[in-house]
Amino acid sequence: MNTPLETSTEEAIAQIDWTRMAKFLAPTMIILGGLFYLLSPMLTPFLLGALLAYFVHPAVDHFAQWRIPRAVGAVLCIAIGLLCIVGFVLVVLPL
């Protein structure tokens, strides 16, 4: 037996005009995709910054638990990351 919530949800889904929605969403997605493609050189630094912040945040929190200021912890994390990258490059491509 269906509960009233399930029945109303199913009815609401059945009442959606999918062709009208597709006529709106398809051009919108094409325009947004083209806009992202054209703006990708400007959006790339923001995306890389967001990824860096996402990956460094747990380590900065860990340093903050050790009573190291967050700014110092962020600088330490970035410095350690850069040293790892430089070390990897020096191992892979010896001078």
Image (tube, rainbow, N blue to C red):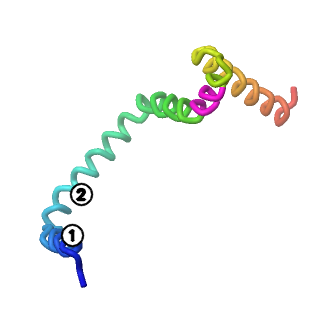
Query: Residue 56 or 44: which is nearer the viewer?
Result: 56
Q: Which residue in the protein does label 2 denote?
A: 26
Of the pair 59 and 77, the residue shown nearer to us = 59
Element type at mark 1: helix
Residue segment shown in magenta: 56-62
How far from the left and from the top, in percent, is residue 54? 53, 35
Q: Secondary structure at mark 2?
A: helix
- The chief SS type of the magenta part is helix
Q: Which residue corresponds to the image point at 51% horizontal and 28% vertical from the top-left?
A: 49
Res. 69 image quadrant: top right
Quick check: 20 left or right of 38? left
Q: Is residue 76 above or below residue 36?
A: above
Q: Name the quarter where the C terminus is drawn.
A: top right
Residue placed most toward the observer, 6 or 91:
6
Residue found 65% across the figure and 18% down from its top:
67
Label 1 close to label 2 by CB (< 8 Å): no
**10 Å crowding of disc 1: few (<14), some (14-19), many (20+):** few
Instruction: Give the residue type at disc 1.
Output: Leu
How packed mark 2 is, by other alpha carbons closer than 10 Å (few <14, some 14-19, many 20 or more), is few
Instruction: List the residue tagged with mark 1.
Output: 5
Q: CA distance from mark 1 to mark 2?
A: 31 Å
- When the figure is inspected, residue 17 is found, relative to residue 62, above or below; the finding is below
Q: Quadrant of the N terminus?
A: bottom left
Kind of residue at badge 2:
Ala
x, y percentage for residue 11? 15, 73
Q: Which sits earlier in the primary sequence, circle 1 or circle 2? A: 1
